[in-house]
Amino acid sequence: MGSLIYLSIITAVTAQRTLILTNKALEAVEAAKDLARQRRHALLEPHHVATTLFSDPNTFASRVLKSAGGDAALLHAELRKELRRLPRGDNDNTPQSAILEDTYKRILREVSGSKGTVAHLLIALLDDEPLKKCVPKSGTTIQAVRDATKKAAKAAGVEDAAETFDALSLYAIELVERAEHGQLDPVIGRDSEIRRLVQVLSRRKKNNPVLTGPPGVGKTAVVEGLALRVLEGAVPEPLRRAKIWALDLGLLMAGASQRGAFEARLKAVVQELERDPSSILFVDEMHMLIGAGGQGAADAANLLKPALARGQLRCIGATTDSEYMKHIERDGAFERRLQRVSVTEPDVSATTAILRGLRDTYEAHHGVRVLDESLQHAAVLAERYISERHSPDSAIDLLDEACARRRVLLDSRPQILDSLNQAANALLGEVQALETEISLRKKGFLGTYFFSSPKNMDVELVRKLDSARSSYAHADAKRQEATSAWRAEKSFYDELRAINLEIEDVERDIATQERRSRYDEVNEGKRQLSVLQRRRLDAVRSAQNASSTYGATDVVSAADVAEVVARSTGIPVARLSLDEGQRLLDLAERLSRRVVGQKRATDAIAGAVLRARAGLRDAQRPRGAFLLLGPTGVGKTETARALAQELFDDARALIRIDMSEYAEKHSVSRLVGAPPGYVGHDDGGQLTEAVRRRPYAVVLLDEAEKAHADVFDVFLQVLEDGRLTDSKGRVVDFSHAYVILTTNAKDSSRFKPEFLNRLDRVLIYEKLDTESLIRIASVHLEALAELASEEHGLLIQMSDDAASAVVDACSDELEAYGARPLRRYVDQVVATQLAERVLRGERSLSLVSTGDGVSIRSEL
């Protein structure tokens, strides 16, 4: 059952009838409503509905117009021009105009009890002024469009009359047409890949490029960039009239359950492509078509092979490297007809350039303004904290969500207004309750026998009612005043958004008219653009000068981007927003506070971090590689933990590999993954998979002396070139990681010279003196006291000699085990006493030294 539009009309029997629209027709009407609201138009007119019907080259209306000899892009430009002449209004819910009501009445008479389809909607709109005026300018006539619509609707025999065109129109989308309608984003920084694509397509035979690369690097965007260049004419002559058809594999396979149905559909597509030499087929996720393993997959490859080999069909594919090797390379006869084009992941600077190219698109879509620092922040944070995904896709997602967040905040009522509403509604409820009680008393429905003086009680109720009414009137006035002020602030940004959308329309119209050499229209468009740009400048000044009592702003700042990252990663916003360079200047001091008694080692590590951050070292190698020598319990592992926390704000940024698990020579395969055919091949390597998912990390190779000597040969390439290839052939980047090895060995003679020569430093950790041990004990005690305060609200006072007493209590073990006995003592002895006090309900405690340690006492 389709959705309903209720429409009252006067008939001979004055009956009320209901217009029922199919889902696609209703979607067009709802899109028209959104368009009217965005443009801040006073009424919903036929202009809006007509514009949405022709907004895409693959809509039913656009294809009907094309079959009637019209130009859909030109018609859409003319309709947008008519939109800009409509009067503006401030209504949040734009009402329908009387003209559109008449249009619905014509549909209602036409459908005779059935559902109204897109075809019915189009035929009815052909009698309205917008299409009457604009259709002839598109190169056809109203009657031709009407006849083509009726023919398509009759041939379809389906509810929405939109699926009766050729196979290409059914199963593919023409990207050049979409580019002409302004539905493709600009493509930045992919010039070399697009040139390579053009070069392969220009060959006489085997002119079939396949774009390969990780997901999210922009393979589809490269093809869209080619479509944009075809539209602009910035390609060689053989490609000037090219049509790029993006095959919809899901639609091609949907419903093809009968044997041979899928092959028949694909064959029809191939035949149409062969009949039109200018057509190019684009198959995204090509492996799904070639080697998915489902019924008919092999036949699909065989259907494509002859046409590809003859050069009669040009095809662009896109898939990931792994899927290419898994499915396409296995079929050598098919693979030799293809030319592989690699699409690599851009670096931070290239990603920032891509975001700058997309800024106008996202500003217009969301109705916000994006600062340049936000774009840089998105590129940096995406690479650092969303490392499991690839740029620029991850950075674009950050920008998109930050813009959406700012738009939602701008459109939503601020929290202070919600509080005022709740307060006013609560007072209104009190007034209504008192009025009801007084009314019932006057009517005698409430007994008064339990009151000492009913008359006095009535007076008291009236007094309470008067007070409640006065309070409600004050709260309601305050609410209305605040609501009006907020709406006034918001109106500045709504107006700016509407102007930006109009500017985007005019710029698109100018480009459309220039391609058709209609220079009078181009000059008129430029004049309108100049007027709109002046209006935008005035609107921006008004928004900047307006008071922002409720924090309304349309500016997307770096803080908005940081907030999005914080919500997805759990990292505090304050840490994301701080400048990394400023944080690193006092890194040595912060490390020495956590790693007590090893200042020479922590200073050396901090210095290496500073050099890496300043770019004063080989960018291909790991940012730091250290071997930490020393007895147990002196802070070697704690150094790695502290470095991960200070640099990456996350304990998960420490990748710990227990080297005692690699005592056998063959265990090296666990680091990079089992070879193909062996158990665990699909799981990847413990080291490579962890770094691939989180390249910004500290890699801790703990207890290194317990691993087999040959295991360290794997790390020679890591330490020299900052890269390691796993068992699946993927190259894992270690250039953003810090590598730390720890060993209890007395010297480094166990390790090969070529391995030691690739390390930055070999740092010796000395045994801890008494002063350092006391500081460590104090750190453990303070951490326990802080935990007790946060969890139970306890107030614990420590005596000056408490830490010394802990050291004395552990003196027998400190020589052999370092500082670890101090933590065990605090956890087992002090924490146990504290737990007993908590369960007794004691809240004020003191920690004092005794003859054999420390004790917790209650402060009464």
Image: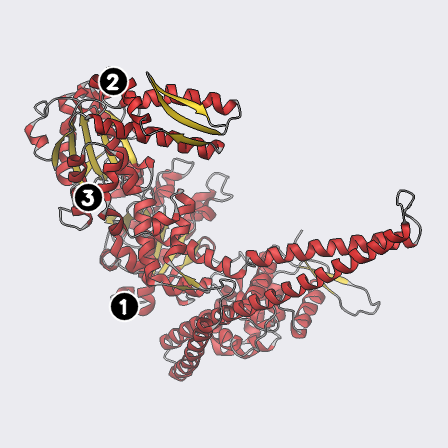
Q: Quadrant of residue 26?
A: bottom right
Looking at the picture, tell me which residue is in the foreground, 546 or 4. Answer: 546
Tell me the amino acid under the disc marked 1: Ala
Between discs 2 and 3, the one toward the N terminus: 3
| Up-down relation of residue 45 to residue 428 (above or below) | below
Answer whether residue 145 is visible to the viewer in this image. yes
Q: CA distance from mark 1 to mark 3?
A: 47 Å
Is 61 on the left-hand or right-hand side of 703?
right
Q: Amino acid at mark 3?
A: Val
Left or right: residue 370 versus residue 463 is: left
The amino acid on which the numbered mark 2 sits, given as a three-letter code, is Ser
* Res. 609 mark: 3
Q: Secondary structure at mark 2?
A: helix
In the foreground, 304 or 684: 684
Residue placed farthest to the front in the image?
A: 860
Determine if residue 679 is in view.
no
Q: Position of residue 565 (x, y in %)?
A: 39, 48
Residue under circle 1?
Answer: 234
Mark 1 vs mark 3: in front: 3
Residue at mark 2: 811
Q: Residues within 10 Å of mark 1 (few under 14, many from 20)?
A: few
Residue at (57% x, 68% y) in the render: 485
